[in-house]
Amino acid sequence: MQKETLITIAERTGFSISTVSRVLNGKAQKYRIAAQTVEKITAEARKCNYQPNLTAQSLRTRRTNTIGLVVPSIDNPFFANIANVIIHEARLYRYTVILVDSMENEREEREGINSLMSRNIDGIIVVPCGGDPRVLETAAAQTPIVLIDRYFRDTTLPYVSTDNYLGSYHATRMLLEMGHRRICCIQGPPTSITTLERVRGYRQALQSFGVESQARVSGTDFSIQNGYVETKLALAQADPPTAIFALSNTILLGTIKAVSEAGLKIPDDLSLISFDNYTYLDFLSPAITRVNQPIEEMGILAVKMLLQILKNKEPGRAQILLPPSLIVRDSVRSLHTPPE
Amino acid sequence: MQKETLITIAERTGFSISTVSRVLNGKAQKYRIAAQTVEKITAEARKCNYQPNLTAQSLRTRRTNTIGLVVPSIDNPFFANIANVIIHEARLYRYTVILVDSMENEREEREGINSLMSRNIDGIIVVPCGGDPRVLETAAAQTPIVLIDRYFRDTTLPYVSTDNYLGSYHATRMLLEMGHRRICCIQGPPTSITTLERVRGYRQALQSFGVESQARVSGTDFSIQNGYVETKLALAQADPPTAIFALSNTILLGTIKAVSEAGLKIPDDLSLISFDNYTYLDFLSPAITRVNQPIEEMGILAVKMLLQILKNKEPGRAQILLPPSLIVRDSVRSLHTPPE
DNA sequence: GCCCTTTGCGCAAACGTTTGTGCAAATATA
DNA sequence: TATATTTGCACAAACGTTTGCGCAAAGGGC
């Protein structure tokens, strides 16, 4: 079975390549192709299962109906989730997604984006992994770019993310209202905007209770190991925390491991609250109280924003923060009442 | 910043397009381009950060340095894991991956594969979601295809998967050796090869203990809900099982939910064993004993097999089953000893 | 029957590459 | 000096599309 092209169809139907092209692109009306001709050509195309050659098509049209998606690690369920939403949403508009994994590495990210651009993809959605917007901003001069989840403080790049500050603020306040004062906050990379915002929310909540001097922030990255190490340290202090706020699902896992190794029970001996939602968190015992990011909405918005930029052919300026919600489960104990 | 092409570089350096092309493709030797010329051209290319237009390139060469990956659901950590390995491995050979999510739907799968092929991708790795190899086999006539995880019984298509039979056999034997006899096996889609093989292993193990009449197999698909429903039913029987064998990580979650709703403790009241490995399983309490599939090896092999087919330009016949391993944790109790 | 409009379609250029072939100049050979 | 060989590069076709333009034939108005 050899490849069918416009040429082979043209030969078999006796019409020219251009006529075949126009018919199959639905431009028969516009070019006044006779109904009979349309009939013949579409019949033939269907019969031989013609599939246009997208590389030729996009060489000519400079469009590929493809968007690039760059995430730091597809292995992280949070990003897998984002990817899932974006792939599905893009499909609705007949866009295909090329996935690039930057491995939390700025160089990989840059190369990935270069590779995407040399493929003439129509736009890029990216969860940036560096602190420097410049690479992305120069790239955005050539290809529309929308940031998701992570973004930059002073940037003109459009983004959609969670209001990390707010989520963190609410979570911390909940702990405070439950009577907790010694609350450890285990953070991700200290320069990342998500970390910064979450820590800001944490501090602000403490301040609203007049206990900002109690702030305990530590941690270096979004890894299980980081959660583990920092929890070990926290628990070894003279005045160990009564609650731990893990700023990501990965950090949470490390924390849980350290806590269980210490022989502590959650929430009786230690309360725990986390960022990021995930099916499995309901199956841990106890189920983990957490800040839920509206991933689905974020993904849909990112795609829509990108498509809008593509349609309007103008830069795109939307910078959107969606409110997170608190999913209350069983990992936080009230210090006002005795343990069960 | 306008796009740099071979043409602009040719103009600026004063050489012809072909010379520029050959130099930048490292074919200077072969075409006896003067060292000085090579120097000038590469300098200019570097200066203006030339990136070849991949669509033009692949239109001409009929290669895209891209492979397609079709999975049933990127949201499932098992497939996210596979995708992760394949993306990374492909990158080593400078291949990019286009990810298609078939949503466990044969029509989506077919369309996805068509779309991939019209992009001239060099090959496809697919976790098929149907029971019929024909679509894939005809596609394989045009583009190299390698199956991963799932495959077909009578097919010439190359594949790499786990020896599901063996994994299931060992897991079931372990339960039997621990004294369990009433073992429920909750399966995925009854026609899928992974289900069939796993059930076969389960039955064979029972038979090796002379208790094949005790076989209890039920279930319809790889969903949390299926695990939940089937467990509910199993527990409601007159002679409820002492152990449950969940044939996937998703089924497992449903089972856990139903078990905990029934107020049963694992492993004291009920033993549990599962297929598929996953970080989170160690964080459940108790940690879940499970059959580990060698995902990393499978992914690497799949990519290597595909690249080999591409290189040799011959169909490729390798059909490989890798042995799984048992990860023993705390969810299985021995009936020979009293509960702790 | 003549001119004008409409209908229906084809020609050919262009997108940015790669690559087989060819050819002039430089060098070597006799 | 005449010929053969090598060196260094350019020409042009091709990959499969899309699309502006143009032109022949048919139909309409008078």
Image (tube, coloured by chain):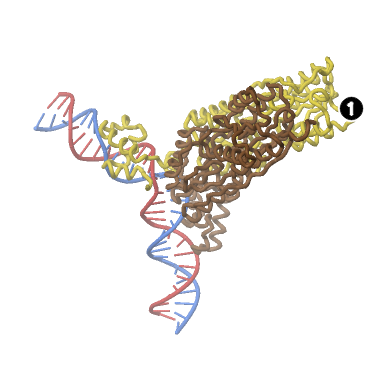
Chain colours: A brown, B yellow, C red, D blue
Q: Amino acid at mark 1?
A: Asp
Q: Where's residue A278, x and y in %?
A: 67, 37
The answer to which image quadrant residue A185 occupies is top right
Between residues B260 and A181, which one lies in front from this camera angle? A181
* Count of numbered labels shown in the rendering: 1
Instruction: Residue B226: name its quadrant.
Output: top right
Return the residue nearer the eye: D12 or A108.
A108
Q: Position of residue A52 (x, y in %)?
A: 51, 48
Residue displayed at 56% across by 55% down: A42
The correct choice, above or below, for B260 with respect to A139 in the image is above
Q: Secondary structure at mark 1?
A: loop
Residue at 75% from the left image edge and 35% from the top image edge? A336
Q: Which residue is mark 1?
A: B239
Instruction: State the image coordinates of residue A157 (x, y, percent, origin top left).
Output: 48, 47
The residue drawn where x is 57% and y is 30% is: A218
In what quadrant of the picture does the C terminus of chain B appear? Answer: top right
Which residue is situated farthest in the right direction here? B238
Q: Is residue B14 visible?
A: yes
Residue under the point 35% across and 32% down: B26
> As drawn, is B119 to the left or to the right of A89?
left
Q: For mark 1, does the 10 Å Cα neighbourhood hold few (<14), some (14 to 19), or many (20 or more) residues?
A: few
Q: Which quarter of the picture shows residue C20? A: top left
Q: Is residue A43 above or below residue A289?
A: below
Most extreme residue toward the top is B337
Classify residue A169 as left or right of residue B271: left
Coordinates of residue A41 in the picture (x, y in percent): 54, 55
Seen in the image, is A21 located left or right of residue B37?
A: right
Q: Would residue B70 be seen by someone viewing this image from the given angle?
A: no
In-image side of A11 versus B2 (left or right): right
- Of residues A174 and A320, the one nearer the viewer is A174
| Chain for numbered disc 1 | B
